[in-house]
Image (spheres, rainbow, N blue to C red):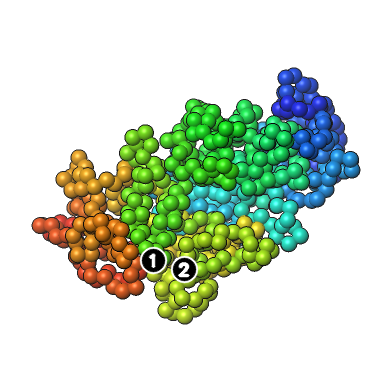
Amino acid sequence: MNHGVHFAVRSQSASSISVCLFDPETGTQTSRTELGQQEGLFSGLVGDAGPGTHYGLRADGGHDPDAGLFFDPAKLLVDPYAKRIDRSYRYDQQLRAPRAEKIDTASLVPKAIVETPLPDLPDAAPMFDPGGLIYELGVRSFSMRHPEISEHQRGTLGALKHPVIIEHLKSIGVSAVELMPITAWIDERHLQPLGLGNAWGYNPVSFMALDPRLAPGGIADLRDVTAALHAAGIGVLLDVVFNHTGESDRFGPTLSLRGLDNSLYYRHEPDGLLINDSGCGNTLACDHPTVRQLILDSLSHFVRQAGVDGFRFDLATVLGRSASGFDRRAQLFAEMADDPVLGDRIMIAEPWDIGPGGYQLGNFPTNFLEWNDRFRDGVRRFWRGDDRMTGELATRLAGSSDMFQQEGSDTTRSINFIAAHDGFSLHDLVSYEHKHNAANGEDNRDGHDDNLSWNNGVEGDNSAPEIVEKRRSDVMALLATLFASRGSIMLTAGDEFGRSQKGNNNAYAQDNDITWLDWANRDLELEGFVSGLARMRADLPVLQQLRFLDGQASSETDIPDVRWLRPDGSAMAEVDWNGADTDTFLMILACGESDDTRQLAICFNRSTYPAHIQLPAESGYSWRIANQPEEAFPSALPARSSRWAVECKSHKTGTDRTS
C-alpha cells in the first residue's frame, strides 16, 4: 500500500511546478499535482505515487528567451534528482518548439521512475593505487565486438563482469578502470540528420540516472560491476560531466534544468546571454548553492549506492568558476573535500575549459590528480623527432615538478598519458600526420589540426611489413616511456593492442566500428609487450613512487634517486639538454637493495640508427635485461626504442620478470 512520495524541486523564478504521473504501459498522463512553494523550494506529497511510479515535472512562469526564461508547461521535464529513467533520451526538434506552439512533449521525454534506494554500502577506503595504471574505457564501444561476450550483454556495464574481461584487465596491470560517462545523455541536434549518434556520452541530461542502454538494471548494474572488479583488486572511477548539459544553447531542447529555472542552473552574461565556457552551448552555474548541492548529491549517490572509488571531472575548470573567473579555493572544492562521503574519494581533474583563463594545469586543490597534457605533448614531440625536447621529456618523466610543486609539495599529482578518448589513438598517432574526420559529416573541420603525430612514411593503413614494424616499434617506445614515468599513468582501452579509428581524431559521433574495439584482430605481440611492462612496473617499486625525482640521494641509499647520462655513461651537460641532435640518453633510477636490484636503467633512443651505450659499472654488480634477468644487457640499443635494465648483484640473476 502506497503512502505517497514527497517531491521537492528548487526554482527561484518559476510561478508553479507540478508532478505528473504516467501509466507505464500507455504513456498516458494519469494525474497532476501542483507543489507548494516557499522561498524557492517547491515541495509536496503525491499520495498515489510509490515505487515503480513513472513521473515527470511541469513548470510555469515567464517566457522570454532573450532574458534567459524558458518556462513552458507543455514541456515535460525530467527530475534532476531522478535515479532511473524508463528509456534513453532521443533528440526531436519539437523539444525546442516555442511556447506559443503549445506542443506537449510528454511522448518525447523519458519518464523518471520512483525507486526504493538500495541499502547504502558500508564505508570502505578507495581501491586505487596512486602510482598505478588507470584504464579509460567507453562501456559501449569496449565490448560491442567482443566474441566471448553474449549479444544481450555486449555494450553494457554487465560485460565488464565477464571473466574474460577481468582477466584481460589483470593481465595488463590495471589498477582502476575509468568509465567514460554512463549517466543518461542526448545526441547533439546536428547528428540525427547525418545518421550519427553520440558514442561517448559527454552530453548529459541526467546526473544520477544511468543511461538504460548501458545499465538496463539501473544503479544495481553499476553496483554489481564495481563489486566484481573490486574482488579482482581493480578500482572503479566514473568520468562525470558537470560543466554543461545536453540542453545546449538557447536553441537547444528543453528537457530538465532549462525548464525548471534556466537562470538558476546555468551561467549567463549580464544581458541574459548564456555563457559558453564549455564549448557546448551552456555552462553550469557551479558557484550557485543549488547546483553545488546537486553535484555533491550526485557524487555521493554513486559512492553510497554503487561503491565507486572516485571521479574524473570533464572540463573541470568550470567547477571552480564564478563571475570573477577560476578560483582553486572555490566553495565547491572545499565542500567536496569536507564531505563525509566524498572526502577520501579519488578526484581527477581535466584541468581546462575553453573560457577565459581556462587552462589551469597544476592549479587545482592538492586533493585532485590532474590530466597532464604537457606530458602527452612532450612525449609525442620527443619521439616525433622535434628539436630540443630532451629536457622537456626528462621533466615529465620526473613527475612534472614545474606544474605540481605547489605549496612545497614533494609529490606529483600528474596523470600521465599519451593518448585518450579525445584525439588520435596510439596506433593512429604513428600512422597519420593529418586527421581524417570526414565520417563526422563536417567536411573534416572538426577535431584538432595539430596532433604532434607522424605516419612513418605512408599516410594511413598499410600492410607493408617494414611499415607495420616501424609503427609497432614506435608504439612500444611510447608505451615504455609512459610506464617509466613518475605519477599515475593512463591508457585508453584498445591502445594496448593497436586500436585504430582510421585517422578520426574526434570520433564522438561514431557509435560503430570506428570506435568499437576489434578484439578479433588485436595485435597480440603489442598486448604481450604491455603485459610485460605492467609486470615490471609492479615488480619495481621505484616506478610506483610519487616523489619528484631531483637527483638527491634518499635516506635508504647513497645513490642519487635519478641520474641522467649520455650514451657513453657520462653525465648529461647543458649542450646535451639543449642540443638539437640529442637523440639518445639514459635515466638511471635508484631502487634500493630489495630483491638484489640496486638501480634501474631506462634507455631512450629515438634515432633511426642503433646506439652504442655504456651503462655505469659498479663493483660487485652487473646489468641485466629487466624482463629477462638471466641475460646481460646488450651494448647496442635498437633504433626507435626504449629499453630497461636492472643492476643486480653479480652472484645472483635477480627476480624473474619474464614478459
In the displayed structure, 394 sits above or below 111; it is: below
Q: Where is residue 102? Give x, y as percent.
A: 89, 41
Could you tell me the amino acid type at mark 1? Gly
Q: What's the residue at 56%, 35% (across, down)?
A: 325
Q: Residue furthest left?
A: 619
**Residue 344: mark in rendering:** none
Where, by quadrant of the figure, is residue 155 drawn?
A: bottom right
Q: Where is residue 289? Give x, y as percent.
A: 62, 27
Q: What's the residue at 64%, 67% (across, down)?
A: 438
Q: Residue furthest top?
A: 38
First reached walking from the N terminus: tag 2 or tag 1:
1
Could you tell me the amino acid type at mark 2? Trp
**Residue 454: mark in rendering:** 2
Using the numbered discs, state the Cα–Cα distance from disc 2 to disc 1 in whole angstroms.
10 Å
Where, by quadrant of the figure, is residue 53 drawn?
A: top right
Where disc 1 sits, the SS reads: loop
Describe residue 68's horizontal placement relative to residue 127 as left or right. Answer: right
In the displayed structure, 375 sits above or below 504; it is: above
In the displayed structure, 167 sits above or below 131; it is: below
Where disc 2 sits, the SS reads: loop
Q: Are marks 2 and 1 in contact (CB under 8 Å)?
A: yes
**Residue 385: mark in rendering:** 1
Q: Where is residue 71? Give x, y as percent.
A: 80, 34
